Image: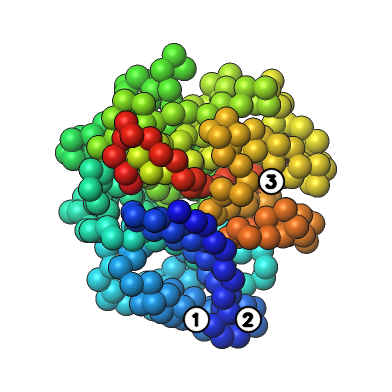
Amino acid sequence: MATCYKELTPNNNVRIELWEFTAANGMGERHVMIHARQSRQTAKEQIESVVEAYNRLLEDLTNYHAVFRRFFLSDAANQAELLTKILGQECQPTATSTVEQPPLDGTKIALWAYLVEGVTIQRLDNGLSVATHGAYSHYWGGTRTLRHGDSEQQTYQLLDEYANQLKEEGMTLEHDCIRTWFLVQNVDVNYAGVVKGRNELFDRHNLVPENHFISSTGIGGRTDDSRELVQMNTYAVKGLGDGQINFLHAKKQMNSTAEYGVRFERGTYIDYGDRRHVFISGTASIDNKGNVVHVGEIENQVHRMWVNVEALLNEGQMGFDDIAQILVYLRDPADYSVVSRLFKERFPNTPKVILLAPVCRPTWLIEMECMGIKEIKDSRFKPF
């Protein structure tokens, strides 16, 4: 098996970052970031360029299917409907998330897509997309929102509905959900409600400190409807057995999230017979007592954040070279030039996008999340 990074510029309008995991006798995987390049173009022109590049890439990658994708928009109120029209009547069953988290390079749209080789993918009536191959079925959920209630009520109901969807498919929230994302309108106001709603629902499912939680990111982001205070995206796997799901803590660097009242795992990894997948939750500049480190110092926060992420990866016998994609969230767009330079120097060969998305504590200036893949050989488990 081998990994490879490519940067493609098929035309003057887009730049494509492509990270490849090529399996010797199994399924390949691709993480893709597509960036608009012409900030002076209209929203319509930029969206058309990104969607066209995405479709052409899928045509070129024979036997690959997108299992999840997220469109990052600079102005959802004016661009979400436009994106829907440009996507048109496509028949792809890909789980899709659309969120207002402006790319900080000055453009109006960016796209992250996760592509897997050789899967059979379909959209279920309940809105989830399932990609199936061999012994496993991977359930991805794109944009799920509600238009009534406060952030606590919306979070609780979204999770409750999702738990029921999993039950219909023979799964449970506590045993089969690997990853969630909560994209929160006005995170400084509404995040507390997200935490409370999630805690209440988790109590019902025995997702408590004595057991385990679910890896997650809770970050600023909104849709085109002001009533939708919370957007939820999800990932679950059916077919995993004992020992395949493991949680990452990095206790020397960070404390348990439960110590400051929230419930999510710092990271999760899944072992298959031929590879390991790691999912690092939204991670910031925090110490092992739950304190924000380097208040007001963006560069130092970046470096402490990296220390924490690397510790989580190392706990899973992985490192920065195994990262397949990175999402970077900034509170202050004035920090973009510094952060962009640092990430280009440290991660020159990793697809990444830097977004305007406030973190859940005002003094956290930056947060990042990532996914990684590494070859392993474990005869206890069936291959991916």
How far across and how far down the image is residue 57, in percent? 42, 75
- Left or right, 313 with respect to 177, comes to right
Task: Check if mark 1's residue and mark 3's residue have beta carbons within 8 Å.
Answer: no
Q: Residue furthest top?
A: 210
Amino acid type, label 2: Gln
User: What residue does disc 2 label?
Assistant: 38
**Looking at this view, is 147 or 61 the one in front?**
61
Would you identify the image quadrant in which residue 158 lies? top left
Separation of disc 1 and disc 3 at Cα? Answer: 29 Å
Q: Residue at x 48, y 41 (%)?
A: 278
Q: Residue at x 18, y 40 (%)?
A: 169
Badge 2 marks a residue whose secondary structure is loop
Amino acid type, label 3: Ile
Would you identify the image quadrant in which residue 348 lies? bottom right
- Quick one: label 1 or label 2, which is nearer the N terminus? 2
Q: Residue at x 32, y 44 (%)?
A: 383
How far across and how far down the image is residue 280, in percent? 53, 40
User: What residue does disc 3 label?
Assistant: 366
Number of marks in the image? 3
User: What residue does disc 1 label?
Assistant: 49
User: Can residue 182 be seen from the camera position used here?
Assistant: no
Badge 3 marks a residue whose secondary structure is strand
**Looking at this view, is 373 or 89 the one in front?**
373
The numbered dot on residue 102 is none
